[in-house]
Amino acid sequence: EVQLVESGEALEKPGGSLRLSCAASGFTFSNAWMSWVRQVPGKGLEWVGRIKSKTDGATTDYAAPVKGRFTISRDDSENTLYLQMNSLKTDDTAVYYCTTVSSTATTAWFDTWGQGTLVTVSS
Amino acid sequence: SYELTQPLSVSVALGQTASITCGGNNIGSKNVHWYQQKPGQAPVLVIYGDSNRPSGIPERFSGSNSGNTATLTISRAQVGDEADYYCQLWDTSARYVFGGGTKLTVL
């Protein structure tokens, strides 16, 4: 069974840093493209960023609101995905979901989702 | 950027057919995916590539996409189908785009 388990809830002050992790199991993590998607409580879904597999260059891509502040990385030996969040803003308060990504030549979608972890940025 | 427009809410009588739309400029030229999110839970993929169902998703869920509108159709709606539904696509410039979500109520 494919499982994604994010690290626990976190609280940080504006301007601070946090690192989220996502433990993967039930599939070949090293072959997978992975992504983070967030959701402000009571609001819609927002893509945060994506990392390709190492065989596809492990390249990353980010949404405009987090570009330059957030970094996605992966440890294939530990089957773990990370989201390093720097220069946090109150607008970053959201539930963060780790997802697998499937793609074709012309599209991509999010197959499996973790349970989500709440990040609160507040003074 | 690319925008996807969904109605805020849709209601359907128990056992009838619900249609949830997702509007976008020439969306029929792109592939649309749909997610179901029940209260307090993570989203679940219910349709990918316009009309394909992942394993485990009932045949009552179907999708179509043409012109400027993609549609998720839920036949024989059940109380358990009450949820928020989101459309999503991939765009070369905007990357991964979500619609604002539609709350489905089964009456």
Image (cartoon, grey):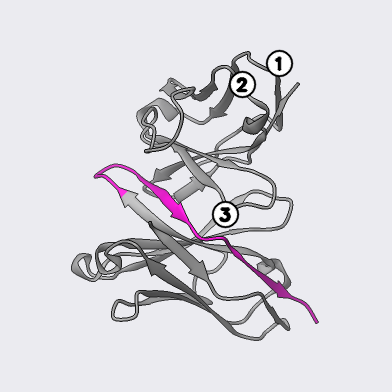
Residue drawn at x 67%, y 33% is: B82
Q: Which residue is at the far top?
A: B16
Out of B81 and B91, give the one closest to the viewer. Answer: B81
Q: Which residue is at the far right?
A: A123
Q: Which residue is mark 3?
A: A46
Vertical order, B51 against A116 (above or below)? above
Percent coordinates x, y for residue B97 in the rendering: 50, 46
Tell me if B103 is positioned left or right of B55 in this view. Answer: right
Which label was assigned to residue B72? none
Q: Which residue is at the far left?
A: A55
Q: Quadrant of the C terminus of chain B?
A: top right
Percent coordinates x, y for residue A40 in the rendering: 69, 58
Question: Mark 1 — on which chain does it sit?
Answer: B
Label 3 Cα neighbours within 10 Å, binned few <14 / some 14-19 / many ≥20: some
Label 1: state its secondary structure: loop
Which label was assigned to residue B13? 1
Residue drawn at x 24%, y 44% is: A105
Q: CA distance from mark 2 to mark 3?
A: 28 Å
Percent coordinates x, y for residue A59 in the rendering: 30, 69
Q: CA distance from mark 3 to mark 1?
A: 31 Å
Going by the numbered disc 3, the residue's amino acid type is Glu
Percent coordinates x, y for residue B106 in the rendering: 71, 24
Task: Check residue B21 for magenta coloring.
Answer: no
Residue drawn at x 56%, y 60% is: A115
Label 3: state its secondary structure: strand
Magenta-colored span:
A103-123
Out of B19 and A62, give the one closest to the viewer. Answer: B19
Dot placed on the residue nearer the N-terminal end, 1 or 2: 1
Question: Mark 2 — on which chain does it sit?
Answer: B
Q: Which residue is mark 2?
A: B77
